Amino acid sequence: MSTVKLTVNGKAVAVDVEDRTLLVHVLRDHLNLTGTHVGCDTSQCGACVVHMDGRAVKSCTMLAGQADGANVTTIEGIAKGDELHPMQAAFRDNHGLQCGYCTPGMIMSAIDIVQRHGGQLDEATVRQELEGNICRCTGYHNIVKAVLDAAGRMKVSQAAE
Amino acid sequence: MYQTTYHRASSVDEAASLFGKSSEAKFLAGGQTLLPVMKQRLAGPSDVIDLGKIKDMIGVEASGDTLTIKAATPHYDVATSDTAKKAIPALAYLASLIGDPAVRYRGTIGGSIANNDPAADYPAALLALDATVKTNKRSIAAGDFFKGLFTTALEDGEIITAVSFPVPAKAGYAKMRHPASRFALTAVFVAQTKSGEIRVAATGASQSGVMRVGAIEAALKANWSPSALDSISIPASGLLADIHGTAEYRANLVKVMAQRAVAAAG
């Protein structure tokens, strides 16, 4: 057992876990942040993507100990109160989800994509960059539309800040 | 996953000493291969020693005609490094093709070459560029480092600290990506060293892991152009065959990827 200290969605937490515990299980089972999903559990589907120190990572492919001291943001941490993050709003407006299982990972990866590419984003780039996120409903068309929409919204909201 | 004990090393020496005290330890860098293997219970190390936070093992540096990538540098940092892009653009490009974005944030060059997957990208670059693998004990030429499937010259407890690449006159990489796994169905790295030597390495092709391709090297030595390989035929014997492609298919890919890599190198 080890104590793992993290900042999750802005809040300092400490959990006592077995060393073999994965980050995703700390989030879901110890912190009850069940928005982060375990889809394939083999590092392929991306349903478990969270941001760690500003980078989108697969939380099913990290030991909790590796994240000790890190700043973690999950899907629960991106809205401002009742105001959805522009990426969440764009997914809703563009019907970018069907069953919704992949959506938290899609959104966390998509925010990372927009942050890396800024205004340079086009459809081909979004499709290429989403390679690590799998939608079993195969609803990629509206997901890509939502990401491009959000890229514009995020630019506007950054400019306003 | 089986029970294990996690250690975070703060220096290479500490990591080596922790290894010596453990019964069956494994070094962990980005964990993008080791952790999936542990989750499937195909590996059950008593201890995992995390190298990912050792500051001396992260970074990309150029000095004279050498580009050095420290072993725990993630693929994303290599792909986006101005230093790497300026010194060996083909190497930065190769790093940008590994896995997916989330994997590239975590996976490292040291982890990739220590694992020596027969379809991994970096081994082709090391072999074609005649790189040197630096460990906490010695320097190993790439040609002596890769010893076949998932096998390297590393001794028990030896830690890769960096890889040094001589900056070539020209280099190019072309990869036929498996559309799901993103591993190389076959990929070829071509390089022309500053002294004029031609070195060509293919990954994802041979049953023995990464390999030099002598026939292509000779043809490119005579004429550095994609068309120089038009009449080359690569034998299929000893090449990988699976549901994704026959040995004959891969043999042809070695030639086609080499042609594309030469075109990319210019």
Image (tube, rainbow, N blue to C red):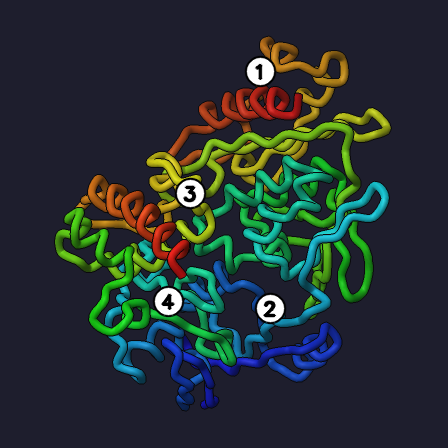
Name the residue rendered at 42%, 86% in the picture: A12
Using the numbered discs, state the Cα–Cα distance from disc 2 to disc 1 in whole angstroms.
43 Å
* Residue type beneath disc 1: Ser
Name the N-terminal-most of marks 2 and 1.
2
> Residue A53 at x, y = what percent?
49, 68
Is A91 displayed left or right of A119 in the figure?
left
Relative vertical location of residue A23 with respect to residue A49 in this rendering, above or below: below
Q: How many circles with numbers are drawn on the protein?
A: 4
Mark 3, residue position: A119
Is B189 displayed left or right of A25 in the figure?
right
Relative vertical location of residue B198 with respect to residue B49 in this rendering, above or below: above
Q: Nearer the viewer, mark 2 or mark 1?
A: 2
Callout 3: residue from which chain? A
Mark 4, residue position: A60
* Residue type beneath disc 3: Gly
Mark 2, residue position: B52
Using the numbered discs, state the Cα–Cα distance from disc 3 to disc 2 in whole angstroms.
32 Å
The quadrant holding residue B232 is top right
Query: Nearest the camera: B152 or B73?
Result: B73
> Residue B17 at x, y = what percent?
71, 80
> Residue B173 at x, y = what percent?
60, 32
- Graded by Cα atoms within 10 Å as few (under 14), some (14 to 19) or many (20 or more), the crowding at tag 3 reads few
**Do tag 2 and tag 1 residues touch (Cβ < 8 Å)?**
no
Task: Answer yes or no: is residue B243 visible.
Answer: no
Determine whether the residue tagged by mark 3 lies in a helix, strand or loop: helix
**Is label 4 on the same chain as label 3?**
yes
**Is label 3 on the same chain as label 1?**
no
Callout 1: residue from which chain? B
